[in-house]
Image (cartoon, coloured by chain):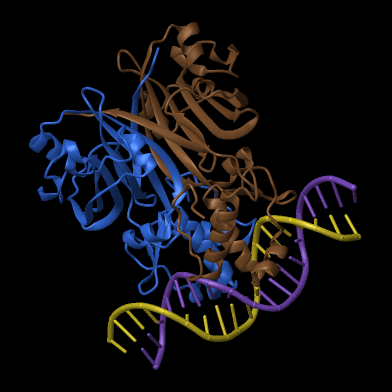
Chain colours: A brown, B blue, C purple, D yellow
Amino acid sequence: MSSSTERGTNGASGPAYLRIAASLRERIGEGEFVPGQNLPPERELCGQFGVSRMTARHALTVLEREGIVVRDVTRGTLVAEPRLELRLGSFSHELERIGRQPSAELLSARQVLPRGAVADGLGIAPQQRVVELRRLRRSDNEIVALETTFYREDLVPGFLDQDLTGSLWDVLNHEYGMRLKRSEAKLQVLPMVSVTAKDLQVREGSECLHLLRRTFDESGRCIEYAEDVYRADRVSLVIERDIES
Amino acid sequence: MSSSTERGTNGASGPAYLRIAASLRERIGEGEFVPGQNLPPERELCGQFGVSRMTARHALTVLEREGIVVRDVTRGTLVAEPRLELRLGSFSHELERIGRQPSAELLSARQVLPRGAVADGLGIAPQQRVVELRRLRRSDNEIVALETTFYREDLVPGFLDQDLTGSLWDVLNHEYGMRLKRSEAKLQVLPMVSVTAKDLQVREGSECLHLLRRTFDESGRCIEYAEDVYRADRVSLVIERDIES
DNA sequence: CAGTGGTCTAGACCACTGG
DNA sequence: CAGTGGTCTAGACCACTGG
């Protein structure tokens, strides 16, 4: 009867779509459906609950936004796996810490003139060229994030010839002798824009953890400016902070 | 033509609801509608875009999830104010830092036996009583968060007689001589459950930044266990972290 | 009372996939 | 081909609010 979470039950009152969502949530919580398993097709749920398809879909949308189910046009609606717990830092190192296999697929690597926000972030002039990398980050082959990083070209000569499929912080440390010291980010919850959703293979409008992130070295110089988009249904973020007294 | 954000344009292709959302987003970005102002009523948008009401609503739901509009049954659909930028820490101090007026409304204050997660968080036995506070946090009178905090009763004698409508960290510091040193939190994106949504006066299922948070003193003892629920459409979180080398 | 958004129906057609 | 979720219609009735 009692679930491990404290989400509302909506046993008998309220809108039909919430009662249906609560019912399915409870059955998933009780193990009637396990991660990776299919829920009944929408048209079948209509029959079971005596509602129209739009209402059954409304209920599934609620569970989808909670990260409890994922939808797939061909496979149907599946129970989701629990979220990864990451800290702000190196994606590779964080995944290794929790016992997962990290990987990076290089989508693009090029030299460009920085947009305003990128130049500001790196503390350079808009005329000064930067290296831009777009990488898809995976955990045990599951896509969880899209990472776009920018570096001052003058600080990382020959960067595009390095191995860019692992930890970039390791490359900065070992190949360029940098001493990364501090990480700073602004986090927002946003629905995913169309191109990003395509890369992450989720539906446009899916919730994401959106990070605008900067990495500084010991001298306080900004070494890296990044925009990270994490699947909000797959990742939770662990944050620590010292308190100023 | 060019907007300050880089959200997808969806000029002419794709589903109607995304084209409508893109069109409204652009017009809001251009200042045709300013924060606090009404968008046209749904039934009017149906006419303007030549779609049924369910489709017009689908488009507005997209913008609502982006935090670009807020909906109100009586006032209609309004353009939203920009998000507050907060760091992990004292809500009161953070709001003061960005020039806003913080306040706290005490919803409940009581002594209880801790749930498992609370006892674990505070590092105490389940038989040891705790003080539980539920407070609604406001910025310039706008509700932005619901904060539920737990303290060991033996560490804060007479706590319920203190002024609990301001910074609790200040109370811990000044009345009990505590030296708060470190803050730690796990962040997830979740849709709001019904009771929380009611307190925050948003629709059930609205996206929230959900924090499970602990505060430690200089000796590493956990002083505070908290569950914070922030309106994801009103708050962004700024994170900093030192890099382990 | 009129106007707002919230919920819901009972269908329809679509793209995509796998057998 | 059947089955899946995705989109969409053209209505309906609801609760709530303010004049």
In the image, residue B65 sits, relative to residue A120, either above or below, namely below
Rendered view: A94 above or below B75: above
Foreground pick, C13 / A74: A74
Q: Is residue B203 left or right of residue A221?
A: right
Q: Nearer the viewer, residue A3 or A138?
A: A3
Residue B88 occupies which quadrant of the picture?
Answer: top left
Q: Quadrant of residue B136?
A: bottom left
Residue A8 in view, yes or no: yes
The residue sitting at 58% across, 53% down in the picture is: B10
Q: Is residue A148 above or below residue A24?
A: above
Of A87 and A134, nearer the camera is A87
Whole-percent x, y for residue B223 in the image:
23, 34
Write the residue at 53% across / 62% down. B59
Relative image position of residue A112 (x, y in whole percent): 51, 26
| Picture layout, residue B166 above or below residue C4 | above
Which residue occupies the foreground of this view, B120 or A63?
B120
